[in-house]
Amino acid sequence: MREIVLDTETTGLSPEKGDRVVEIGCVELINHVPTQNTFQVYLNPERDMDEGAQKIHGLTNEFLIDKPRFEEIAKDFISYIGDSNIIAHNASFDINFLNSELVRLDIDKIPEERVIDTLKIAREKFPGARNSLDALCKRFLVDNSNRKLHGALLDSELLAEVYLELIGGKEPDLALAVENKNIDENKTEPVITSSLKRNKVLRSRLTEEDQINHKKFIETLKVNPVWYNES
């Protein structure tokens, strides 16, 4: 299963008032595992940047002036997302902006049924709590220390980690399959096989104090457990 985690930066808050997309960032998930296949582009919005928006993402008119226009990258963007589901935080904001850009070029909109809103999921799981991307990073111990300013690709990478936590933790692709193994002619025994794909080993959440306390506990046991390996 392929999904695309997506974020945008814009010139302002309203495509209806002429605001445009200035950055798109995407992260590919295959079976809920991030791959190295990302998409990121800065765009010349062909209009001035709102001062409030610039304070959020730091992108200036001068920086964007020589960047491609959306029409120049539209085919690459559409090809990248394909028919995959789109994951976004406060998804209506990003999708409305992207659809506004697509409509300008007479290209079909991204359909609503393909969009998964992580803000909606978070509000259902944690009603009344703060559910901004920063708040969710803090809740799930996702390192967002590099997020001094908003950036579409960085925010997509952070959101990918948050999304996996929201849907049940970082091991949603531990798939259990049951096969029949012949014991004899009259009996079968179910055999459970598993498949877990991950690109990188997750960092341990155990503190040094936790590890020391665990070692002290092991030393209190009368025998050396066969499962304990000090190394």
Image: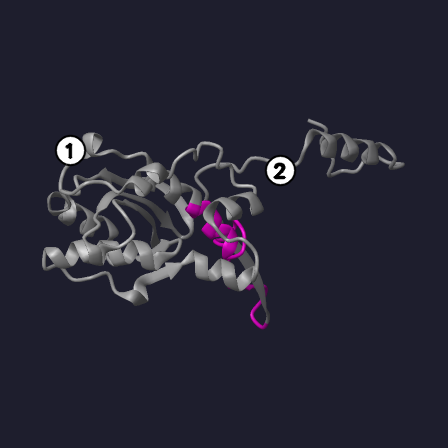
- Which residue, given by chain and number where applicable, does mark 2 sit on? 205
Task: Indicate whether 2 appears above or below 216.
Answer: below
Residue 176 visible somewhere in the drawing: no
For the C terminus, give its image quadrant.
top right
Asked if residue 166 lies in the magenta stretch, the reply is: yes
Position of residue 176 relative to residue 68, above or below, is below
Segment colored magenta: 159-186
Decide whether residue 202 is among the magenta residues.
no
Residue at 22% across, 50% down: 19
Q: Secondary structure at mark 1?
A: loop
* Residue 104 horizontal/vertical position (percent): 12, 56
Q: Amino acid at mark 1?
A: Ile
Q: Residue at x 10, y 55 (%)?
A: 105
Q: Along the horizontal axis of the image, is 226 left or right of 100?
A: right
Image quadrant in which you'd find residue 11: top left
Q: Amino acid at mark 2?
A: Arg
Picture residue at 33% right of the left edge, 47% below the top: 7
Q: Residue furthest right?
A: 222
Q: Which mark is residue 100?
A: none
For the N terminus, the image quarter is bottom left
Q: How far apart, in angstroms, are the residues tagged by discs 1 and 2?
A: 44 Å
Where is mark 1, residue-wise?
65
Which x, y percent locates residue 218? Answer: 81, 35
Q: x%, y% of residue 110?
A: 24, 61
